[in-house]
Image (spheres, rainbow, N blue to C red):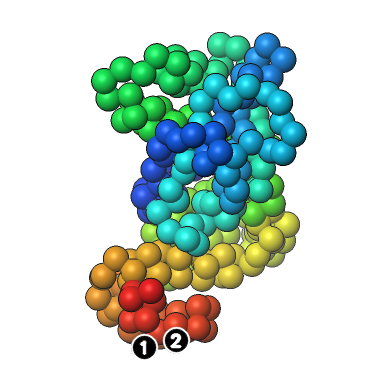
Amino acid sequence: MADLDRLSALMARFSLSVTPVAPGDAHLLILSGGGARVLRLTPRATGPARGDRRAVLAAARIDWGTDDSPLAEALPDALEQALTPASDLDAVAGLICAEAAAPRCGAASVLGRLAEILFVHLLRARIETGAVPRGMLGGLADPRLARALVAIHDRPGEDWTNDALAREAGLSRSRFMDVFRDAVGLSPQAYLRRWRLALARQDIARGDRIERVARRYGYGSGEALGHMVRRETGLTPLELRRA
């Protein structure tokens, strides 16, 4: 399990970017809390919590690449992580705070890159400790389910049956189905459909041909993909692209 990369296949699919901003516009804040730094992430809201008197050391806004990013949806409304001194997270946070305190040439670019690194380190730390909510991250925190989820994320166009995914996880079919639903909150096939649709919507929106997108993600035909898009969004693929 130590060699399994649980995040790269996920993050490579979406063009996440992080930009330094004023605290009121930020999703990601580094705060001063009782002598230690605290990382606060609020993917669906911006700015410090009401009444929060902690000093803001650095602030950044996250562009998730798409309005329905599975990664953003998998995160809780608010996530706080105390940064242990000398940890990887604290080291990156320290670089960000130093750069923000004395900006130099290229500071915005440096801060953006460092904030992306900080975000990945945060996800890694939460997954490794199991401190994640039910959902995609909850599944990735389980060493058995992570193998199946990484396979889906990395090869979404394959004909993934429940039996095939159970073999990836090293579990019996019935045990896999139970464990997956408990950790993720969906059946494996429902998760697969949502993942494929999120990728297909992103590709359609950026102008890829409908038939090509359908083949890429295992829909069989453009008509089948169009039916799924209409059912989930109320729009045809062309309307989705224009929107």
Q: Which residue is mark 2?
A: 227
| Image position, residue 95 (x, y; %) | 44, 17
Badge 2 crowding class, 10 Å Cα cut-off, few under 14, some 14 to 19, many 20 or more, is some
Q: Amino acid at mark 1?
A: Glu
CB atoms of marks 1 and 2 within 8 Å = yes
Q: Rounded to the nearest whole Å, what is the CA distance between mark 1 and mark 2?
A: 6 Å
Which quadrant would the C terminus be assigned to in this image?
A: bottom left
Q: Which residue is mark 1?
A: 223
Mark 1: secondary structure = helix
Position of 219 relative to 33 (above/below): below
Q: Residue at x 28, y 80 (%)?
A: 211
42 displayed left or right of 241: right
Find residue 143 and report its image quarter: top right
Badge 1 crowding class, 10 Å Cα cut-off, few under 14, some 14 to 19, many 20 or more, is some
Q: Which mark is residue 109?
A: none
- Observer able to see residue 144: no
Q: Amino acid at mark 2?
A: His
- Observer able to see residue 241: yes
Query: Along the line of sight, which residue is nearer the eye, 208 or 238?
Result: 238
Mark 2: secondary structure = helix
211 displayed left or right of 187: left
Q: Residue at x 53, y 61 (%)?
A: 165
Query: Along the line of sight, which residue is nearer the eye, 236 or 157?
Result: 236
| Image position, residue 62 (x, y; %) | 46, 43
Q: How many marks?
A: 2
Q: Residue at x 37, y 81 (%)?
A: 239
Q: Residue at x 54, y 51 (%)?
A: 72
Query: Along the line of sight, which residue is nearer the eye, 34 or 184?
Result: 34
